[in-house]
Amino acid sequence: MSQVEQFDVLVLGSGQGGQLIAWHLAQAGRRTALVERRWIGGSCPNIACMPSKTEVWSARVAHLAQHGAQFGVTTGSVTTDMATVLRRKRDMVSREVDLHLQNFRATGAELIVGNGRFVAPKTLEVRLKDGGTRLLAGDQVFLNIGTQPAIPEVPGLEAAQPLTHIEALEIDYLPPHLIVLGGGYVGLELAQAYRRFGSRVTVVERGPRLMSREDADVADEMQRILSNEGVQFLTDAEVVVVRGRSGERVSVKVRTSSREQEIEGSDILLATGRIPNTAGIGLDEAGVELGARGYIRVSDRLETTAANVWAIGECAGSPLFTHVSVDDFRIIKDNLAGGDRSTRDRLVPYCMFTDPPLAHVGLTEREAQHQGIAVRIARLPMSTVLRTHTTDEAQGFMKALIGSDDRILGFTMIGSEAGEVMTTVQAAMLGGLPYQRLRDAVIAHLTVAEGLGPLLASVLPGSAQ
């Protein structure tokens, strides 16, 4: 067995939170090693957030070029060169990875590329990518091991070798007919992108509507927008069997309440959820317990059941967003310095980068009802926001939930610049401002955020209902 190398800090996984804790503690003079099996920088810059949004933007450019005539711009025939789309995405990833490597060099944290497995408490055996084995022990250990796409147990599905978001961002051809299994955020972003590139796209969703965590009016509006672009939808649809091979020819048998039907396509994109990367890495040897769904069991300070072992990001059951992983890092960093921060009651926003995008923060209507919280609801069509009269981006709406104390409890928007507008509302919520302060704010003209004035002016006076 290899001789044990002792470190002050061991980090398993180089996602955003893991990297930040490694760089921070290394700069503080702690001997730090980070073990990453494949994606330097984690999923966000390599296979998820940034690559997908890079291709989504290419798809938006294609869409604008196809509709240039309505803006007075005459173009010829528009086609998509998927090899160039792929090259642009890979160039972006390469630049991002280089930045991460620079940070490792600058901070002194040692990056070790290989597969890590716990063989004892706070002790990792690492099978190195270039051969050989190292045995590492740490006084403090941080787990940042992420999640992976879940593959449902459908006959023939795994044998069909479906695309996940990883492979979908690596193909250099245009699928003639892409069948997307799953009507959640990832599935819808890529469904619209490939439709705009020129593919025929069919989305199959097992539930009664898309984006199951959203209110019905939000899901219905997004389905209407994407349907108008030619994306086809089957909801309340169970996949019975899959035949063929993705990338060649596939057939998907689907059962709805009324009938069974066969969908013939060229490629399958699997976007039906994720599972944590906690199996097979010796967490039991490390004394780290898992919850019922395989996520690492943590306290609200992100401490695991093993002493001096923390978990960061998705593997700890935190919301599946890079910005949450960053906040997990901040919580742990401050607590290591004697603070008392936790994950309780944090206000977590999110965006879906369709065009127009979806943004949300705080409570939904359905959550308010389930929790017995009385709210007043204000709603404003994007077509009434003056900025959209200049850009022809009039689809969608804003919606705000106002509590009995006049504070904003939730905000949802489908529309141009939704993420930026939502951040303004989030700041007001964090400050505990009554909605009137934002309603009466002098907001620059012509901006999309200017719509917050008339939205909040429509709040009914009196008590919440």
Image (cartoon, grey):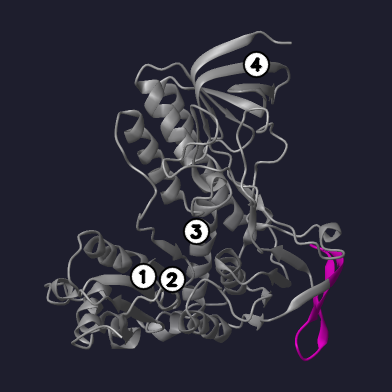
Direction bottom: furthest residue: 258
Tell me the crowding category of disc 3: few under 14, some 14 to 19, or many 20 or more residues within 10 angstroms, Cα based.
some
Q: Which quadrant of the figure has residue 465?
A: bottom left
Choose the circle earlier in sequence order: 2 or 1: 2
Choose the circle earlier in sequence order: 4 or 3: 3
Q: Amino acid at mark 4?
A: Leu
User: Residue 153: within the magenta?
Assistant: no
Residue in view at x 61 percent, y 74 percent: 195
Mark 4–mark 1 Cα distance, whole angstroms, equals 48 Å
Looking at the rendering, the stretch of residues picked out in magenta corresponds to: 241-264
Q: Which quadrant of the figure has residue 461?
A: bottom left
Pair 1/3: label in front: 1
Instruction: Check disc 4 and report the residue beneath it.
Output: 135
Give the structural element (helix, strand or loop) at label 4.
Answer: strand
Give the structural element (helix, strand or loop) at label 3.
Answer: helix
Instruction: Check disc 1 and report the residue beneath it.
Output: 418
> Which secondary structure dominates the residues rendered in magenta?
strand
Choose the circle earlier in sequence order: 4 or 1: 4
Q: Amino acid at mark 3?
A: Lys
Query: Mark 4 near mark 1, Cβ–Cβ under 8 Å?
Result: no
Q: In the image, 23: left or right of 451? A: right
Choose the circle earlier in sequence order: 2 or 3: 3
Give the structural element (helix, strand or loop) at label 1.
Answer: helix
Residue 381, horizontal then vertical, whole percent: 34, 87
Query: Mark 2 near mark 1, Cβ–Cβ under 8 Å?
Result: yes
Mark 2–mark 3 Cα distance, whole angstroms, equals 11 Å
Residue in view at x 69 percent, y 26 percent: 129
Pair 4/2: label in front: 4
Give the structural element (helix, strand or loop) at label 2.
Answer: loop
Instruction: Check disc 2 and report the residue beneath it.
Output: 357
Of residues 397 and 297, the one nearer the viewer is: 297
Of residues 283 and 1, the one nearer the viewer is: 283
